[in-house]
Image (cartoon, helix red, strand yellow):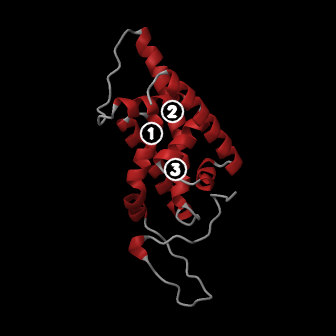
Amino acid sequence: MRDLRRVTPVSVDRETKESPTDADHRVPVVRTFDGFVREHGRRLVGLAYTLSGSRSAAEDLTQDALLAAYRRWDEVSQMDDPAAWVRRVVANRSVSHIRRRMSEAKGLTRLELERPRPDVPPLSAETEAIWAEVRRLPRRQRQVIALRYYDQLSMSEIADVLGCSKESVNTHLRRARTTLARRLSEGDVT
């Protein structure tokens, strides 16, 4: 398993492409934060949306993750895969968001207030039902499904993002698929 905190300059930003002056000597290349955001921002928002189910929460989660990256950019930019580190922050913070949202919903129910629905682009009923079921899965299974099917990461990339082994990712993915297949067939959603 690759250590996401390891500092080795391997990434090159599209804006600051510099080639080493000598084939045997690699010159460290520093990528810009703005370039990183342009390259990965949209996908990070999408990942946060698949995990949270809310466009506004997705934007907030992404902003929080990017702020954390910005504060440590000297370190993060030198990682083998800075995007994996930021994805991990999004995945971890989405758990906190869901917990807060559940507590908030309980409080609103006690007060008998209706919870306002965020303005979300329309999804087909089938797609919405599938992602609703994904959000009901245990935390790691939910994260693995979102990273695999929304972000289209490989199993080893998911393992890097979540800080676990590839075998663990396979286990979570298999369990999630089994649970989703059972739930969706019972509800005739597919």
Q: Secondary structure at mark 3?
A: helix
The kind of residue tagged 2 is: Val
Locate the C terminus and report the quarter of the image it occupies: top left
User: Where in the figure is residue 141, as x and y percent of width and height?
Assistant: 59, 37
The one nearer the camera, 77 or 149, is: 149
Q: Secondary structure at mark 2?
A: helix
Q: Which residue is mark 1?
A: 50
Residue 178 visible, this angle: yes
- Quick one: 81 or 27, which is closer to the camera? 81
Q: How busy is the neighbourhood of tag 2: few (under 14 within 10 Å), some, or many (20 plus)?
A: many
Q: State the SS at label 1.
A: helix
Residue 63 appears in view: no
Which residue is painted at 63% across and 58% down in the image? 5
On screen, residue 52 versus residue 156, left or right, reads: left
Q: Position of residue 3 (x, y in %)?
A: 67, 58
- Decide: marks 1, 3 in contact (CB < 8 A)? no
Could you say where residue 168 lies in the image, as x and y percent from the top left?
Answer: 69, 44
Could you say which disc has been placed on residue 79 in the image? none
Residue highlighted by disc 3: 87
Amino acid type, residue under disc 3 in the picture: Arg
How packed mark 3 is, by other alpha carbons closer than 10 Å (few <14, some 14-19, many 20 or more), is many
Q: Nearer the viewer, mark 2 or mark 3?
A: 2
Amino acid type assigned to the residue bearing label 1 in the image: Thr
Residue 61 drawn at (x, y percent): 44, 42
Residue wearing tag 2: 134
Q: Residue at horizontal 57%, vertical 54%?
A: 154
Give the CA distance from mark 2 to mark 1: 9 Å
Q: Is residue 90 above or below residue 52?
A: below
